[in-house]
Image (tube, grey):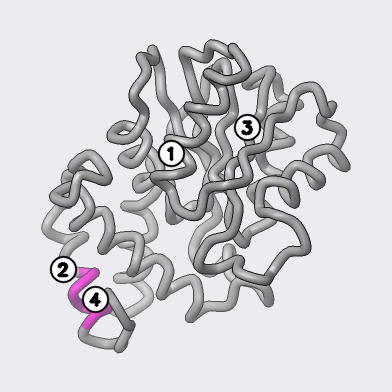
Amino acid sequence: MKLYQHIETLWEYMQLKHELTSADCLFVMCSNDLRVAEYAANLYHHQLAPLIVFSGGEGRFTDGLFEKSEADTFAEIARMAGVPSEAILVETRSSNSGENVRFTEALLKEKGIQCDSFILVQKPFMERRAIATFEKQWQSSYSRLQVSSTGHAFFEYINEEMPLMMVLEALMEDFSRVKTYPEKGFQTTQHIPSHVESSYQALRDRFDFNAV
């Protein structure tokens, strides 16, 4: 199998491609990809949910990148896209996915907002890890959980802000977390088909990524 095929195999595995139905809340785990904020605004305008929560302070990819927190930066983009301020909540303390979930749950409780169904909004290669993290870290009851992203193919997703090697390394790191985080208590266990694991190992053999 050629190298790009291994990349695409891993990329496709990380996306769950849910057919979305309406929910109580669009829950955006913020990052360095501003397209996610635009996509969340688009979902709001398509009436997928009446509320957007943007969660994120600073993470490993955004330290010093934005003038404001990830959540405030994303919320500003959503407002510019026509989402009313009253439909937006921001959580600005979290620095990783687990904190995104726990701190958002605490924020909704503090505000007295009851949400029974969620659409997690993420980068394409973080769909699976986002849902696995939510399933493990969210302590309240909920009735339905979905995840969505722009759904770009790998080579359509990369651009000047998100160059190839940055995205490939992030993809490898996130897949590694899908494998190892369940035993640490951070995420639910995800089934990994043998051909997906083989592609991961082939990419590891080809590239020298730190901490993967």
Alpha carbon separation for disc pair 1 and 2:
22 Å
Q: CA distance from mark 2 to mark 3?
A: 37 Å
Q: Amino acid at mark 1?
A: Lys
Q: Are marks 4 and 1 in contact (CB under 8 Å)?
A: no
- In the rendered image, residue 5 lying in the magenta stretch gets the answer no
Query: How many residues crowd mark 1 within 10 Å: few (<14), some (14–19), many (20+)?
Result: some
Q: In the rendering, at what x and y percent does residue 138 appear?
A: 36, 29
**Disc 1 element:** loop
The residue that label 3 is drawn on is 53
**Residue at point 39% right, 65% down?**
171
135 to 161, vertically: above or below: above
Mark drawn on residue 198:
2
Q: Quadrant of the C terminus?
A: bottom left
Residue flagged by tag 2: what amino acid is it?
A: Ser
Query: Between disc 4 and disc 3, whose residue precedes?
Result: 4
Please provide the residue range marked out in magenta.
199-204
Q: Position of residue 7 (x, y in %)?
A: 36, 70
135 displayed left or right of 93: left
**Could you tell me the amino acid type at mark 3?**
Val
Label 4 belongs to which residue?
Answer: 1
Q: Give the quadrant of residue 190.
A: top left
**Closer to viewer: mark 4 or mark 1:** 1
Q: Dot 2, how many residues are within 10 Å of its Cα: few (below 14), some (14-19), or many (20+)?
A: some
Residues at discs 3 and 1 in contact (Cβ within 8 Å): no
- Mark 4 and mark 1 lie on one chain; the one further toward the N terminus is 4
Q: Position of residue 121 (x, y in %)?
A: 55, 39
Say what amino acid the circle numbered 4 marks: Met
* Marks 4 and 3, how far apart at CA: 41 Å
Circle count: 4
Name the residue nearer the viewer: 42 or 134: 134
Task: Looking at the image, tell me whether mark 1 or mark 2 is earlier in sequence order.
Answer: 1
Tell me if 86 is positioned left or right of 35 in this view. right
